[in-house]
Image (cartoon, rainbow, N blue to C red):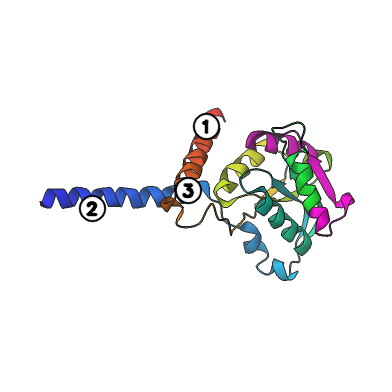
Amino acid sequence: MIKFFAWILALIGFFVIFIVSTTLIISDKNQLIEICPNYKNGECSQNFDAVVAISGGNTSLRTRKAIEIFKSVSAKKLIFSGANSDPKIPSDARQMANLARGSGIIQDEILLEEQAQNTHQNAQFTAKIIKQNGYKRVILTTSKYHQARAKLEFEKALKDSGVEIISAPVLNDPDWNEFWWVKLRGWYLSMSELFGIFRFYIGA
């Protein structure tokens, strides 16, 4: 009986460690809040060149987060990245831009990257825009479970360019919170991101 309970405790311990470790690996802290704690109130003395949002997951939430940030800080451009699997439908980036314009952001403040079909391409293709414009401080926003991998890809694509990537993940996502492990969707997302990060390092 003692051995049985010991095994149960060991399994519970492993499960807890796995959940905590997975959360830490695939999530990235909100660096923008660390730099500008009151940025939502327009209280940020820092200057940024661009705010980047990439499609996927809950694209609408990612877009709205980027719009919120762009309106709250001093930034030159709002960049949206993402293709659409259906060529007959406007790209994700264009749909994101439509949402931004509907919130009062003018066309001249928006740049589009409409070819990327995955995170690696989001980073590679957007990096070209960043380099061409000479941007050096870029805020990157995506879903919290996706932030760490996205930042890894962007930092690799911008290696040796002197560009600083600042994470600002979506915090209120119905697909992801501290209890992600109680939902099948949470397990799917976490395993996908762990595999993506593993593949990133294998291919790096």
Please report whichever mark, 2 or 1, sits nearer to the chain's N-terminal start.
2
User: Residue 188, percent across and down?
Assistant: 48, 42
Q: Which residues are magenta?
A: 100-129
Left or right side of 87 for 151: left
Residue 159 visible? The answer is no
Query: Rounded to the nearest whole Å, what is the CA distance between mark 1 and mark 3?
Result: 20 Å
Which amino acid, mark 2?
Answer: Leu
Q: Residue furthest left?
A: 1
Residue 199 is labelled as: 1
Identify the residue at horizontal 64%, vertical 43% (top origin). Answer: 56
User: Residue 89, percent across and down?
Assistant: 76, 36
Looking at the rendering, which quadrant does residue 132 occupy? top right
Query: How many neighbours does mark 2 have within 10 angstroms: few (below 14), some (14-19), or many (20 or more)?
Result: few
Please report whichever mark, 1 or 3, sits nearer to the chain's N-terminal start.
3
Please name the residue that numbered disc 2 is placed on.
9
Q: Is residue 40 above or below residue 125?
A: below
Please name the residue that numbered disc 3 is placed on.
186
Identify the residue at horizontal 65%, vertical 41% (top origin). Answer: 155
Labels 3, 2: front one: 3
Query: Rounded to the nearest whole Å, what is the CA distance between mark 3 and mark 2?
Result: 24 Å
Which amino acid, mark 1?
Answer: Arg
SS for callout 2: helix
Which amino acid, mark 3?
Answer: Gly
Residue 135 is labelled as: none
Query: How many neighbours does mark 1 have within 10 angstroms: few (below 14), some (14-19), or many (20 or more)?
Result: few
| Marks 2 and 1 in Cβ contact (< 8 Å) | no
Reply yes or no: does residue 48 show up in magenta.
no
